[in-house]
Amino acid sequence: MIIKTAKYLVSSPDYTMCPKPDRPEYAFIGRSNVGKSSLINMLSDNQKLAKTSGSPGKTQLINHFEMESLPDKYVPGKTPASPWYLVDLPGYGFAKVSQTQRKQWETMIENYLRKRETLVNIFVLIDSRHEPQRVDLDFINQLGEWELPFCIVFTKADKETQKEVSKNVKSFLDAMRKTWQFLPQSFVTSAIKKMGRDKILQFIEQCNVSVKEAGKE
């Protein structure tokens, strides 16, 4: 996939106020400070698209980014660009907010994930520097109970040795196997080295094609 354009569209406090559901969309969510903005900027090849911050809890609304992409093998002037939405959701975990604010975020996120009709896939970001965290496993198990499609994206793979990253990834997937019969697709990424970018974009392209074909039936 080749990203043709990527631009911020709107931030919404509720799923009912999100843009018209007229194209596939993909949500990105993870524990606070997991590197979500950096990953989004890496995927879009635009370092200023999502605002990065060292302070957890920066994202507080449902942020839609308008994307247009072309397949790797496109014909200039003949292959139309595919429109889709990339959605940046508030993080979960240790953001320093009140219980009331946290509950509002949880409700907003749940309503969006469960009721947004054009949501194709959820990318759950996991920090590859750490051993399995209960908050991540609990969130993933919740997605399973809601029967929502998701992938796992292990972030910050450049921050540790390859051996340590591999150990942490294996530990996390092993922890999932205790409650999951089949594991979702997973990606190991580094925003700095652009590791995993092509694989994630290829996955999104395949999903877009499937959505388009399903609409023709």
Image (tube, rainbow, N blue to C red):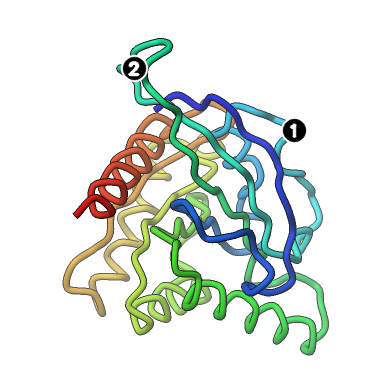
Left or right of 210 in this view: 172: right
- In this view of the protein, which residue sits in the foreground, 184 or 122? 122
- In this view of the protein, which residue sits in the foreground, 73 or 159? 73
Query: Which residue does the image show at 44% across and 35% down from the upper left?
Result: 82
Query: Which residue does the image show at 45% across and 79% down from the upper left?
Result: 138
Query: Which residue does the image show at 81% across and 77% down from the upper left?
Result: 97
Residue identifier under label 1:
48
- Classed neighbour count for the residue bearing mark 1: other residues with Cα under 10 Å, few (<14), some (14–19), many (≥20): some
Expressed as whole percent of the image width and height from the top left, the position of residue 84 reads: 49, 45
Helix, strand or loop at mark 1: loop
Expressed as whole percent of the image width and height from the top left, the position of residue 127 reads: 52, 54
Q: Quadrant of residue 34?
A: bottom right
- The disc placed on residue 30 is none
Expressed as whole percent of the image width and height from the top left, the position of residue 40 reads: 59, 42
Image quadrant holding the N terminus, namely top left
Give me the C-alpha separation between circle 1 and circle 2. Answer: 27 Å
Tag 1: amino acid: Lys
Q: Is residue 217 above or below residue 73?
A: below
Tag 2: amino acid: Tyr
Query: Which residue does the image show at 37% across and 43% down from the upper left?
Result: 204
Left or right of 196 in this view: 41: right
Q: Is residue 99 above or below residue 15?
A: below
Tell which tag, 1 or 2, sits nearer the viewer: 2
Helix, strand or loop at mark 2: loop
Residue identifier under label 2:
74
Q: Quadrant of residue 102?
A: bottom right
